[in-house]
Image: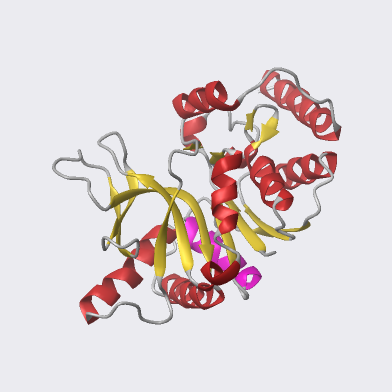
Amino acid sequence: MSSVVLLGAGLGARLRPHTDDRPKCVVEVAGEPLAGRLLRQLAERGVTKATVVVGHFAERAKALISAYLRSRAARLDLRFVENREYDRSNTMYSLLLAMDALADGGFVVEGDIIASEAAVDALTAVATGARALRSSWAVEAWTAEHSGSRLTDDGHGRIVQQEIWRAATTGSAAHLWKSAGMLHLSAEGARALAKELAQGASAGQRGLYYDDLIGQMLRRQRDAGRAATDGFDLHTLDLAGAPWMEIDDASDLAKARAMFESPGREVSEYMVLLRSYSRFSTKRRSSL
């Protein structure tokens, strides 16, 4: 069907101590590393190529993701790209490093997202037929409890504004949406975003979120008074209550485990490898 870029290079500082011996993208929920779970779900729906951007504990991320996907017999052409500036850059730079994988369009997903089967169904459905010709951003309706990447649509599903929102939400939240950290990019949209990311990196914007760069593109469109420029036409994909979570801290992790975990775990190559890392981590801490 398509390709996916998964962003998993970050430090995950707010998730410590869970990230003391691994990157956030391989913290487990229901016996699955976050990145592995999402890649498995996409592979089961026809995605055939995956590029994972790693940074913090890069080798461990590669080993755990690879072993997990082998244990599930996932049919994915898997490659890794390393962001060696992971501790002084942000998701815009990680995405830039992997944009060649999306020359024909595809998915962008964040490595700290856990999504239900229904949410991934909705995401992959927009990559088929006429809908594949436009770009879509998975979202849920914005509420007073939300913060982070906030999107505004024009009343017809087309996204016209993006902002990182940290303040309290007052007044109407009509046409406001919370990013679910998963996008489908058309080939034209991917090319436009790749150009924006490259220009941003050259302009000293490596410390920004990819969301911010999309926001810049949308702002130029508004300022020009045009519906879409540079081939970038982005629409909301309402997950309509399908469960998903972004895991930023220990509280989020506890909620995700309560929401998604089920009894019983399959002992696999992945679990054996994970246990070996746990023994290494315990030994290392005891020697410090």
Q: Which residues are magenta?
A: 91-102
Main SS of the magenta part reads helix
Residue 168's quadrant in the figure? top left
On screen, residue 177 above or below 94: above
Q: Say whether residue 97 is magenta.
A: yes
Residue, x 39% and y 45% (percent of image)? 140
Residue that sits furthest to the left in the current view: 171
**Horizontal and vertical percent for residue 53?**
63, 56
Residue, x 45% and y 57% (percent of image)? 137
Residue, x 70% and y 27% (percent of image)? 31
**Horizontal and vertical percent for residue 234?**
41, 67
Quadrant where the image shows the C terminus: top right
**Horizontal and vertical percent for residue 50?**
70, 58
**Horizontal and vertical percent for residue 44?**
73, 49
Q: Which of 126 and 17 lies nearest the eye of the viewer?
A: 126
Residue 241's quadrant in the figure? top left
Quadrant where the image shows the N terminus: bottom right
Q: Which of 112 and 153 lies nearest the eye of the viewer?
A: 153
Q: Is residue 8 left or right of residue 204?
A: right
